[in-house]
Every structure is written in structure tokens, then in C-alpha cells.
């Protein structure tokens, strides 16, 4: 597992065991304004908040801001 901070990333979730996920971290819903496909700032496992799609929000039963 690795991580990096970059400017302007968008969430990209790979739904496979060998995928590489990119998470656009957020602290408030306005942080997701530039990520049109992932407009929801929701808490993931591990306590981090990330911008996610409406589908991930609904099917993941996530807590969102």
C-alpha cells in the first residue's frame, strides 16, 4: 500500500482485488465540488472522509457530511 498527496485528484475506485484506488480526501462537502462524478464527502473504513459517487454512498451505506 502506498499514498501520495497530489493537487486536483479525483476519486477512482477499482472494484477488483488488484486495482489501485485513488481517493480524493475531503473535510467538508464543498471539497468535492471539483469531483463531478463523486460529489459526496463520506466516511470510509479507517475514519478518513473521501469524495464518493452516489452509487458508492448508497450501496456502501456510508455516513456522509
Image (cartoon, grey):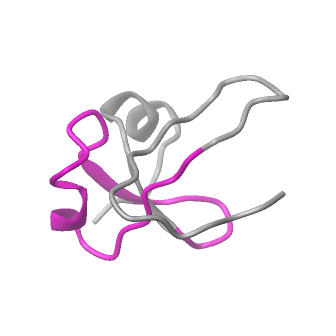
Would residue 33 be counted in the magenta stretch?
A: yes
Residue visible at 15% across and 65% down in the picture: 30
> How many numbered dots are placed on residues in this image?
0
Left or right side of 44 for 35: left
Left or right side of 5 for 4: right
Residue visible at 40% across and 52% down in the picture: 9
Above or below residue 60? Residue 33 is: below
**x and y percent of residue 16 in the render?**
76, 23
Question: Which residue is outermost to the front?
Answer: 7
Q: Main secondary structure of the magenta part?
A: loop
As rendered, which of 65 and 35 lies closer to the eye?
Answer: 35
Q: Quadrant of residue 54?
A: top left
Above or below residue 25? Residue 58 is: above
Quarter of the image containing the C terminus? bottom left
Residue visible at 50% across and 36% down in the picture: 12
Would residue 63 be counted in the magenta stretch?
A: no
Q: Quadrant of residue 32?
A: bottom left
As rendered, which of 54 and 32 lies closer to the eye?
Answer: 32
Left or right side of 35 for 12: right
Segment colored magenta: 22-48
Quarter of the image containing the N terminus? bottom right
**x and y percent of residue 57 in the render?**
40, 41
Question: Which residue is outermost to the top?
Answer: 16
Q: Quadrant of residue 4?
A: bottom right
**x and y percent of residue 46 in the render?**
68, 69
Residue visible at 59% across and 73% down in the picture: 47
Amino acid at each position: 500500500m502506498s499514498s501520495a498527496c497530489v493537487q486536483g485528484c479525483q476519486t477512482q475506485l477499482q472494484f477488483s482485488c488488484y486495482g489501485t484506488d485513488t481517493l480524493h480526501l475531503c473535510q467538508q462537502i464543498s471539497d468535492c465540488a471539483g469531483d463531478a462524478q463523486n460529489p459526496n464527502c463520506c466516511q470510509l473504513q479507517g475514519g478518513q472522509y473521501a469524495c464518493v459517487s452516489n452509487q458508492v454512498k448508497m450501496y456502501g451505506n456510508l455516513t456522509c457530511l
